[in-house]
Image: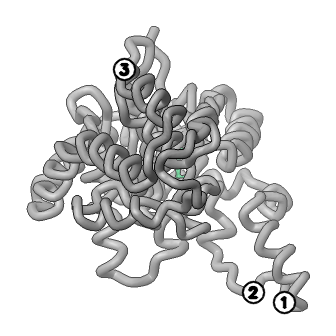
Amino acid sequence: MRKTILTGIKPTGQVHLGNYIGAIKPALELAKAADYKAAYFVADYHGLTKINNPEEFRHLSYGIAATWLALGLDPNKVIFYRQSDVPEIFELNWILSCFTSKGLMNRAHAYKAIVDSNKRLDKDIDFGVNMGLFNYPILMAADILMFKTEVVPVGKDQVQHVEIARDIAESFNNSYGETFLLPEYKIQDDTAVLPGLDGRKMSKSYKNTIPLFEDPKKLQKLINKIKTDSLPPEAPKNPDISVLFMLYKEFATFVEVEKMKEQYIKGIGWGEAKKELFNVMNRFIEEPREKYNELMSSPEKIDKILKEGAEKARAISVPFLKEIKSKIGF
Ligand code: TRP
């Protein structure tokens, strides 16, 4: 039996190369593996806890969908939908909230981090916390449990959320008998931590990212901004400590990487190394960028794909919610 894997992608920012290498690429590979049945979705209602501007919300939601499609997600193989198109999830969200102790939510990392920071700043502990943020893990549990998910591929920061989903599932099952499957998480490999413009991990919070679908001119400009040392062109350089080389490795072929290594050791000018990096990055991005731009300019195409996905998702969620409600006594 193929296992069900499911993951949600929150539309709260522009997707960058670090997201692609660290999260999107491995998730797409998992979805292709023969032993999984995959469901990937745009977690738009989760985004609402942060984004309050309608234009931005729309743009980011479409942007996430277009990114996955442009990078090769096949909607015929993966159930690909928008969370807000599957209303049963929100009904389940309420049901689950009645089986979630408030203390469990008090201990959720994202909420606790804000409380701690408020305490340090001598503010009310709940300053800046809306109930969407507080209840975030329950909605995520509904996402996961609705589709009898067995495996949730996530980053380390989301592990606790999957554990919370297990706790909530158990609490419901204790009252009504085996209903929900207990999901497991699969941590996405950390080996491919992509350095950003300043050499630290590429991350939105460090403002050091290279957006995935940047046009070639801007891409070149960003690459030119990558920090290097002041060695002259002819000086031998150590590829293992060069950010340019670390990035190059992710996008070049094996043969290209070996050759570049030799050039570093012989001595290569940083300008030249940057040009070479641009070439391999741009080569990789070119095709998906075109597809992305095409999708973004006709959002009705994205809508159609997501609607079809939602129909497939609802073929599961409608009967399952009915079963759950009849157990409760509706
Ligand atoms: N919380 C996840 C994130 O921030 C997004 C998400 C929402 C999710 N629902 C999910 C991930 C269900 C896995 C399963 O990235």
Which residue does the numbered mark 3 point to in the structure image?
255
Residue 105 in the image: above or below residue 92: below
Is residue 255 visible in the rendered structure shown here?
yes
Determine whether, in the image, residue 233 is placed left or right of residue 167. Answer: left
Residue 168 in the image, given as x and y percentages of width and height: 71, 44
Residues packed near mark 2 inside 10 Å, few (<14), some (14 to 19) or many (20 plus): few
Can you give x and y, in whole percent of width and height, for residue 197 in the image?
52, 61
Residue type indicated by callout 2 = Phe
Badge 1 marks a residue whose secondary structure is loop
Q: Residues within 10 Å of mark 3 (few under 14, many from 20)?
A: few
Q: Report whether residue 330 is seen.
A: no
Q: State left or right for residue 188 relative to residue 110.
A: left
Q: Nearer the viewer, mark 3 or mark 1?
A: 3
Q: CA distance from mark 2 to mark 1?
A: 5 Å
Q: Give the percent coordinates (x, y) of residue 45.
A: 45, 64
Kindly report which numbered mark, 3 or 2, lies closer to the viewer in this rendering: 3
Q: Nearer the viewer, residue 83 or 125?
A: 125
Q: Furthest-bottom residue in view?
A: 123
- Residues at marks 3 and 2, CA–CA distance in whole angstroms: 54 Å
Q: Residue furthest top?
A: 1
Q: Please tell me which of labels 3 and 2 falls first in the chain.
A: 2
Does any atom of ligand 1 lie closer than 8 Å to the CB of label 2?
A: no
Mark 2 in CB contact with mark 1 (< 8 angstroms): yes
The residue tagged 2 is 127
Residue lying at 44% horizontally and 12% vertically, measured from the top left? 35
**Residue named by callout 1:** 124
Q: Residues within 10 Å of mark 1 (few under 14, many from 20)?
A: few
From what the image shows, is residue 123 above or below residue 264? below
Q: How many marks?
A: 3
Label 3's element? helix
Amino acid under disc 3? Val
